[in-house]
Amino acid sequence: MAKKAPRHDVGDEGLEVGPPKEWAAGVPAVAHSLAMSYAQMGVKRTLLTLVQVNQKHGFDCPGCAWPEGRHRSPAEFCENGAKAVAEEATLRRVTRDFFAEHSVTELAGRSDYWLGQQGRLTEPMYKPSGSDHYEPVAWDEAFSIIARELRALESPDEALFYTSGRTSNEAAFLYQLMVRRFGTNNLPDCSNMCHESSGSALTQTLGIGKGTVSLDDLYKADLIFVVGQNPGTNHPRMLSALEKAKGNGARIVAVNPLPEAGLMRFKNPQKASGVAGRGTKLADRFLQIRLNGDMALFQALSKLMLEAEDADPGSVIDHEFVETHTHGFHDFEKNVRELEWEDVEEATGLPRAAVEETVQDVLGAKSVIVCWAMGLTQHKNSVATIREVVNFLLLRGNVGRPGAGVCPVRGHSNVQGDRTMGIYEKPSAAFLDALRDEFGFEPPRRHGADAVESIRALRDGQAKVFIAMGGNFVSATPDTAVTEAAMRQARLTVQVSTKLNRSHAVAGEQALILPTLGRTEKDGDRFVTVEDSMGMVHASRGRLAPASPDLLSEVAIVSRLAMRLFDQDGVAGIPWERFEADHDAIRDRIERVVPGFDDFNARVREPGGFTLPNAPRDERRFPTDTGKANFTANALDVLRLAPGRLLLQTVRSHDQYNTTIYGMDDRYRGVHNGRRVVFVNPGDLAERGIADGELVDLVSEWPDGERTAEAFRVIAYSTARGCCAAYFPETNVLVPLDSTADTSNTPTSKSVVVRLERHVAAGGAG
């Protein structure tokens, strides 16, 4: 029997589809930014707030983690950054009257967009056991409820502590400290669902689970690959960096199943050429690759480089680097030389000539950077694919020198910083030793549960309390029906949030909503810090008055909960009350526990902050098990589909960031007033006898049965043959909980085998 997720979208009765755009940003981006900001914040508040975004003495954008650089413009934000700020700094409010009017059951039937549009949460709310409504609760009582339920567990491992990427360094450090003091490493986070594959692969090959490039490196590169990424929507400020790199002479290769407007042409709204001119063509080459074909592409590029070296010894491979700094070259070489071109062409969907032309770009470049995002990280073979990216770069010494390296472009602001602070279910022994030595208790050593394992634990009754420090766990995770049922089985769910989302409506037997300050808001004279996608740590200071006098900062919430949780057995060595009052005291402890944070309080007060050490980049030192950068041999397993099937990837719309839906348009793809759509190549539609505009069900097939996402409008679109795309979270139902990447356990949301079936409406009408 097919598994179906409950429908809670707004329908597509007003859906309009036009031609996709061939460029990104420009005046329309400014107009959309201001229109949404004015609607949420009003004109004065908009002008006062946006000028503080990403400034050296302002607040860090609550959107993406793209770095700001040393020289900043007065408008250091993008369209989606403005939307994120407007959503947080909105004048709309969700009060106790709202919860009295709307039951939890009713809220569960509302769309993600509707929920998010209601405004800021204003006071703690509690859903008692047996009730279908949230009701006001005092902060002290809320903390008592949580402490009571945690103490009642048979084991600390029956509790799960989730973290979203927006949590500050200070709050994340205290959160993991509280959790480990409680006795568990159950610290799932949003990295588990996005860039965990990057961290796994890079740790194995380079010894550090982060990228190795800075913004200056991007400007110095001769060749930049942008793979599995849509910066025009997901990291728009990256377009300005690519434009600058182009101005310095770089070539750009875009690798993606979908043509992305931002990589075709960028009209920088801060330049005359972007307002009145044609802007800048970014991608010199577009490889429209088949989904899951990236491993085959990079293996083929490496194979061609080895063959070019054979033809002209000493001209291609950096033998000195390979011999001095790497391990495993011969096994890698043997594996790649045995690669069959028939497999490459089938896996990539690219003609051999296109790959051969691309390798000429590589041979003509002294310094190469490969950037990627979730288009590479959410497949079964994601870790192996990223290892092949590293192989490709190591061959010519493109790691650890200017203008070269790996650049995983992280999503949420401070998702990387949270991991640096210890938000990880598999902490290193060195980190736990430092925590023990600093705070005088023995942290648990057993690995905890990641995001997927947490859902299984709730489903199977092995976990009973779920606490989320931000985020929208229910909408972000796979297998929607399974996840929602698992969450409802919990004895207590707790959501620390700024705004309403689906996770508040999919609640446990008891549920708490704890409203917190946002990045835009003042917390007395205190500031917090974040780490961007390239390892820069800087301060963030809110400027707005809090949305309600009943809000607490994340630091205060963690500190007060810890005081209540541990008040029976003492808190020797952990001054929670002082931490709440004095963030410098937290940073002093971070300095002594986390490497790279020497003189933290002084350095973070410098304009722009400081850069964390990065051994591969700074010293060409690789802290792996071998002490060198590791080449790897990865078997190519071509994903072959049964007749009539397509390979689906989940994507975001332009009016979306992660699970937050800002609006119902995807301007660059030509979609307006709707989200329940599926993009399919016209040739694939013709083969199936399906017309553009028809209504279909998406059906995925798995060993445990089929999963169905109903009623999607077909859009004929220039995606790679054999592939299709649709928005998440609407299509999360199609991804089973047990379909995850090898090693990283990340859900396989970018390679879902589906078939299209004509939708039959209730009553039999098509």
Image (tube, rainbow, N blue to C red):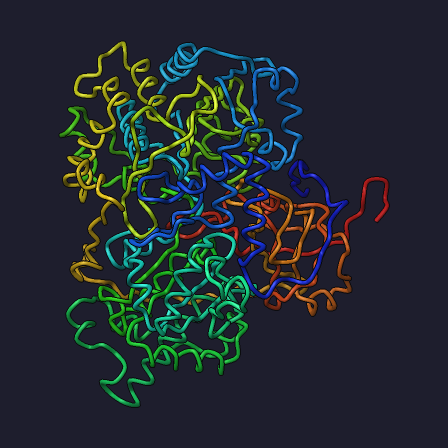
Residue nearer the viewer, 688 or 40: 40
- Residue 705 occupies quadrant: top right
Point out the residue furthest to the bottom here.
311
Asked whether residue 260 appears in the rendered view, the answer is no
Which residue is rendered at x = 16% and y = 60% of the image? 619
Asked whether residue 56 appears in the rendered view, the answer is yes
Q: Position of residue 296 (x, y in %)?
A: 44, 70
| In this rendering, position of residue 296 left or right of residue 525 | right
In the rendered picture of this protein, how many numbered marks are placed on residues? 0
Q: Position of residue 174 (x, y in %)?
A: 28, 28
Q: Position of residue 55 (x, y in %)?
A: 35, 44
Q: Position of residue 79 (x, y in %)?
A: 51, 49
Residue nearer the viewer, 73 or 485: 73
Residue nearer the viewer, 80 or 385: 80
In the image, residue 495 sits, relative to residue 317, either above or below, namely above
In the rendered image, the quadrant that contains the N terminus is: top right
In the image, residue 463 sits, relative to residue 26, either above or below, namely above
In the image, residue 348 sits, relative to residue 537, either above or below, namely below
